[in-house]
Image (cartoon, rainbow, N blue to C red):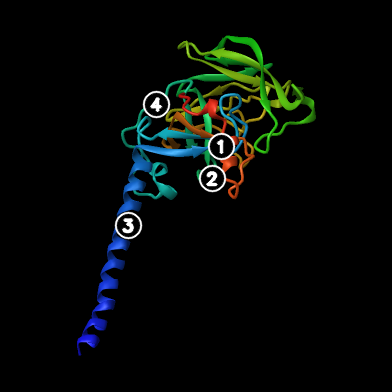
Amino acid sequence: MTETASRSKIPVTLGAETRETISFLIKLVIIVSIFRSFIFSPFNIPSESMLPRLLVGDYLFVSKWNYGYSRYSLPFSLPLIPGHILARLPERGDIAVFKAPPGNDEDYIKRVIGLPGDTIQMRQGQLILNGKKVPKQRIADFIVPITPNYTCSVDFQDSDKGKPICRYAQYRETLPSGRSYNVLDRGETAADNTGLFTVPADHVFMMGDNRDDSADSRFPATEGQGIGYVPTRNLEGKAVLMFFSTDGTASWFLPWTWFSAARWGRIGGSF
């Protein structure tokens, strides 16, 4: 009877342990979800639209409180937050993550160029903000190594000490606030000359720093082609800190390559 009684207790003990494990995992998921929704969230760069500031393979933290909260602040855009609470406008020059129109289901990252009421236009690659040219100064070419995380067309390929690189014309733009950042110019494209845009209320105008390779507010909201004006409620957060960067040469099965592939000089950079 003693042996039978002991055996009968085993499922009860395992059941209690299982419940504790499930309870812990649920609490962990809730805590992580709250942290990612309201405090900080990681984001990785999948495209070259924000060159030269952001490279494919960069990983950064986005602060979630800067622009307020909406359903797009939550995992899977759960409709648990009505409207846009604690809403605040970004500053021109901020690098922001947002749900891209028209689908509002894919995360994009661009630079805030226009606020409600602003007028925006591009003329021969020159940014015109509220009727005035944004100062644009030619600086040294931007050079990026060709790696698994980045390739470029033949027109921009070069070499540096025998290693293949991409080389682009680079400029320094300075907004009226004094905030400066670098942009790339790959030559004359359809993105260099636009009509006049007037940013409507509760929207912002977003542009990529890689001006000739960015599906942004210069183009109508069409999947994969442009995003039009971005509603402020779509803003998820502001880029604040680079916490990792890789050139894509690492292999999961070769741990030492995790270190050789890291772009250490980019880690820790702020925005």
Identify the element where label 1 is drawn.
helix
Identify the element where label 3 is drawn.
helix
Give the residue at x 57% y 14%.
Answer: 173
Quadrant of the drawing holding the N terminus: bottom left
Residue under pointer 3? 26
Quadrant assignment, res 188: top right
Residue under pointer 1? 259
Give the crowd class for mark 1: few <14, some 14-19, many >=20 residues within 10 Å.
few
Tag on residue 103?
A: 2
The residue mark sitting in front, 3 or 4, is 3
Relative to 60, residue 91 above or below: above
Give the crowd class for mark 4: few <14, some 14-19, many >=20 residues within 10 Å.
some
- Is residue 182 in sight in this rendering? yes
Instruction: Kindly report the distance in space between the C-alpha atoms of the residues bearing marks 3 and 2.
Output: 30 Å
Residue under pointer 4? 89
Left/right of residue 137 with respect to residue 8 in the rendered view:
right
Relative to 252, residue 108 above or below: above
Give the residue at x 58% y 48%.
Answer: 252
